[in-house]
Amino acid sequence: MTLPNIPQLPTINEFAITVATVNGSGSQTANQAIVRAIFRMGIPVNGKNLFPSNIQGEPTWFTIRVSARGHSARPAEAPILIAFNPRTAEADLAALPPGGICLYPDDGPWRPRRDDVTGYSLPVKELVAASGFEPRLREYAANMVYVGALAALIGIELEHIRGALLHHFKGKAQPAALNFGVAQAAYERFVAAYPQALAAPRFRLAPLRATDGKILIDGNTAAALGAIFGGVSFLTWYPITPATSLADALGAYLPRLRTGPDGHPAYAIVQAEDEIATLGMAVGAGWAGARAMTCTSGPGLSLMTEFAGLAYFAEIPCVVWDVQRVGPSTGLPTRTAQGDLRAAAFLGHGDARHVVLLPGNVAECFEFGWRAFDLAERLQTLVFVLSDLDLGMNLWTSDLLAYPDAPMDRGKVLSAADLERLGSFARFADPEGDGIGARTLPGNPHPLAATLSRGTGHNERNLYSERPEDWKANMDRLSRKYETARRLVPQPVAEEDPEATVGLIGFGSTEGVIREARDLLRAQGLPTSFLRLRAVPLGESARRFVARHRRCVVVELNHDGQMRDLLRIHCPEHAARLLSVAHSDGLPLTAEFVAESVRALKRL
Amino acid sequence: MTTARQPVNALGLTRADYRGAPSTLCAGCGHDSVASQIIAAAFELSLPPHRVIRMSGIGCSSKSAAYFLGRSHGFNSLHGRMPAVTTGAHVANHTLIPLAVSGDGDTGSIGLGGFKHLLRRNVPLVYIIENNGVYGLTKGQFSATADEGARLKHAGVNLLPPIDLCAEALLAGCGFVARSFAGDAKQVRELIKAAFAFHGTAVLDVISPCVTFNNHDDSTKSYAYGKAHEEPLHDVTFIPRYEEMVAEFAPGEVRDLRLHDGPVIRLRRLAADHDPSDRLAALMLLEQARAAGEFITGLIYLSEGRPTLAESLGLGPTPLAELPADTLRPPPEALAAVNDEFR
């Protein structure tokens, strides 16, 4: 087949690129430079890294989605392929849609052999040799060749490539210039070698102003910054993908943002021996009055189970970020999912129920980063924040991080003077009827202040008790507290379409996917409303949303339909209205998949 | 209430001010003897009760945290997890004085990993292991410190070698390692006082008989065995201030170990001389005692100088838990600058 010989209008600012490389070859530098350069042209863009659980040598794919409309979901197909991994090149080529473009290096025997794909060979061998890179960094230079060629092909301004590299190297001119030199040479060679590609371009960028007032950031960095502006003073953690970069970001920003006026760190970071100890330390610090957090992923969450129950029952504030990966078990450590919802909401044996915040975008990772501490101290309990690998580790075009709009809420803490005024103290009394007692912190010198916190049965005065009525009264109070939490947590965001009889319900990183799927469905004659849940416990507004729609489809990135199940428990009277599109294969959902799955539902 | 006749300490508190709730342990339990010595030591040292935090895990020993220092804050946490909780509390407020009781199940089995890492971090803590070689609350199973060949009514014969918690502590870098016997009240008390003066984690492995499940005469963790076989390395006296030392001793008879804040641990030689500053000698001592089936007690190892966890973290004088809001939350300009960096 030959391409039709009629001039085609290029697709502007609305396409995707797949970069196939080998992990450990430094392609992140190249890929992130491309994303940032496009962002600096004012065009909304995001990048998703699909990487193996491996250090070096395995295939990795990076998808760049350019979307003037602001769509951020994983694209169903990418018409431009940078085929820099000979092992996967043939399969990557097969995935290109007809009319696709393939950039490939000339330093190996592989060539794209498809009539409906245009291939451009890049002079990697020659440019790397001329790059001035020392031999062990040659792969980095090779990556810069595709950066330059792609810039020429789709029209990334070189000045923005230069700026993005300078950003990446944190202002260090020498490595930025070395890398830029290769990109520039590749750009010039591409322009000279393939004038036809530029004369009748298929995919082009055109500068916009759509990223003014926006930033390009990953969710884990936003979460870390949120925690810092929320006053975190103690991070305890154990290395685990994909939460490690959250701890790393805290380690990078805390020294700068939170060195105290006396020059001492107004924070501490401890890498613990396991996730049992991470939450144990956070609980100890929360008990002693610090704003303590830990960050983890599924396997760590499992290890934290017993301490989660203790924090719930002894009523200790602390924050756990779970950047979810695919489980059960070790699962797919470097792939994304929303599969820990059920575990987090009920972590621990017995009647334990937890507050779980569900940030839907990176700006909310920041917001919930600080808000989680206020909720934890107000409610005197463990607060989970569920992010995921897609949200946490990928680059998103985002609104600016917004400064907290409320002063810190340290909750009900009694000072010695308070105790003197009150004349008595019962840790778990509930005079305000919100289920929350007042606590005293260790070090409070008042003779009434001391109590022995415990995970064993206790009465209102926090003394050991096996009396049935004490146990029952305590659990009843914890239920009242859960109702208080229901009112205090971030409420859902609803986008109602007056024509819709079907509602889509989602949470977390699928926000963009569902938004795009709604556009597809509307174009296909199925208008939908959208409810984005932002926390558990679920509230009345979720119940009302379900009641207002003939059917609601809960879209989520797990196998079992965990949120659908929670909603059915929350509003059993509407259980039959709640349908499920639940899917987990390690990859972020695509809008096309969601739209097709919704339309395929039999009972819609 | 303080009455005129009751002795008071430097804070004007009586011994009763350091008591806790009445014990619910079995009558004669070794842990109750240890609790009385904790009360005595805290009273004699004039510890401000509100500065002390009493920490424990789960088990008979950990229950006893309720039975002393009732005016101190405390946390009866999870089985084997006292070290993690105490580490967190220390980082949050390093001006507190942690005192922990935990058992051999806590320390030697479920929490052995946490125990070792606590010591690596050198969290300042008086860590009293009430070691009876048996699980009491679950009615008499062997613990990891039970001697090989030990017999229990239901559990039968223990075929596994014991974990020596003092040796584990030494290998993990602990700078204060002592073993004692609940039946030796004076030694327990003096070692607790010395442990409070130590700068770092102090481990006291106290053989504390379980009168219900492991106190038969052939048990190496029984009162009878302890009384008959205890071989103190030294006679230990804790002297809060050096200038108060009055007694004269012949050269070679005593070894005075001065701690960083000025107090002295005076060791009066009894039999063979053991130098507690020699780590290798301490390990050999434990190994020789194990091989010979000897029950040695006393200060096995003492070495100050390693930084505490708070020092390693570079924490300032104000505890993290007491930092004001304007230190905890950077100003809006700081966020504006951060936002700029992500463009």
Image (cartoon, rainbow, N blue to C red):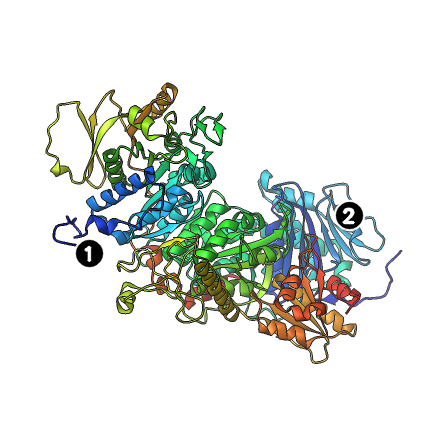
* Residue position marked by numbered label 1 in the rendering: B1
Q: Give the letter of the chain under mark 1.
A: B
Residue furthest toward the right? A1
Q: What amino acid is at disc 2?
A: Ala
Q: Give the letter of the chain under mark 2.
A: A
Dot 1 and dot 2 within a common chain: no
Q: What amino acid is at disc 1?
A: Met
* Residue position marked by numbered label 2 in the rendering: A91
Question: Where does the C terminus of chain A fall, quadrant-wise?
Answer: bottom right
Q: Which of A50 and A559 is in front in this view?
A: A559
x and y, in percent, of residue A432 in the image:
41, 71
**Up/down of B91 relative to B256, above or below:** below
**Up/down of A578 relative to B317, above or below:** below
Residue at x 72%, y 74% (from the top left corner): A550
Residue at x 45%, y 24% (from the top left corner): B149
Q: Is residue A172 visible?
A: no
Quadrant in the rendering for residue B210: top left
x and y, in percent, of residue B13 in the image:
19, 52
Quadrant in the rendering for residue B322: bottom left
Which mark lies nearer to you, 1 or 2? 1
Q: Is residue B82 visible?
A: yes
Quadrant in the rendering for residue A399: bottom right
